Amino acid sequence: MVIAVVAASGAFARPQRPTAELRGAGAFRAGLAKVGLSAEQREKIRGILVAERPRLEALRGERSTSKAALDASLQGPDPDPTAVGSALLRTRADRQALRAERTKVREQTLSVLTPEQRATLAGYLAGARASRRGDRG
């Protein structure tokens, strides 16, 4: 009887992971929705995203290709260390290029916001980070 009550109460349930809204770009988009963008600001941000989409998609494709090459270089009983190292370096370079492009898009987006909106967004993102960490600090 006691076991059934404890099991039903969820005492052994895993902690919930933050929703996608609170991770990465999802948190940034959710935060933008909360800052009260004007129609003009929304259009400017949409223009930034539309202009940068082809470059981001190309970088994602390159990253995917380099990850597949790394996986392929690791297959087999005796992987070539030079091929593995080269593939790993390419994967790292692709990840850094994608990160730099996303940072550029974020900075362009932030330039559209007023100082008050940037402060509101920063507060929202700080709360999302704290939630992701489970309020560990």
Image (tube, helix red, strand yellow):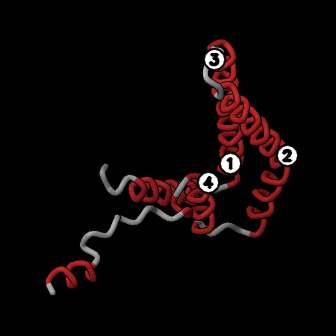
**Where residue 89 sits in the image (x, y, percent)?**
65, 21
For marks 4 and 3 on the same chain, the one whose residue lies earlier in the sequence: 4
- Quick one: which residue is furthest to the front in this view? 77
Tell me the residue that label 1 is attached to.
111
Q: Residues within 10 Å of mark 2 (few under 14, many from 20)?
A: few
- Amino acid carrying label 3: it is Gly
For marks 3 and 2 on the same chain, the one whose residue lies earlier in the sequence: 2
- Amino acid carrying label 2: it is Pro
**Where residue 4 sits in the image (x, y, percent)?**
22, 83
Identify the secondary structure beneath mark 3: helix
Labelled pair 3, 1 in contact (Cβ < 8 Å): no
Q: Which mark is residue 25?
A: 4
Identify the secondary structure beneath mark 1: helix
**How much space separates mark 2 and mark 4, taking CA atoms?**
17 Å
- Quick one: which residue is furthest to the top in this view? 82
Given this view, does label 1 or label 2 mark the residue nearer the observer? 2
Residue at 69% across, 51% down: 109
**How much space separates mark 1 and mark 2, taking CA atoms?**
21 Å
* Apparent side of residue 31 relative to residue 48 in the rendered image (left or right): left
- Amino acid carrying label 4: it is Ala
Q: Which mark is residue 85?
A: 3
Answer above or below: position of 24 versus 104.
below
Residue at 62% across, 14% down: 81
**Where residue 87 sits in the image (x, y, percent)?**
69, 23
For marks 4 and 1 on the same chain, the one whose residue lies earlier in the sequence: 4
**How much space separates mark 4 and mark 1, taking CA atoms?**
17 Å
Tell me the residue that label 2 is attached to.
54
Labelled pair 3, 2 in contact (Cβ < 8 Å): no
- Which of the 4 image quadrants contains residue 90? top right
Identify the secondary structure beneath mark 4: helix
Given this view, does label 4 or label 1 mark the residue nearer the observer? 4
Residue at 46% across, 58% down: 128
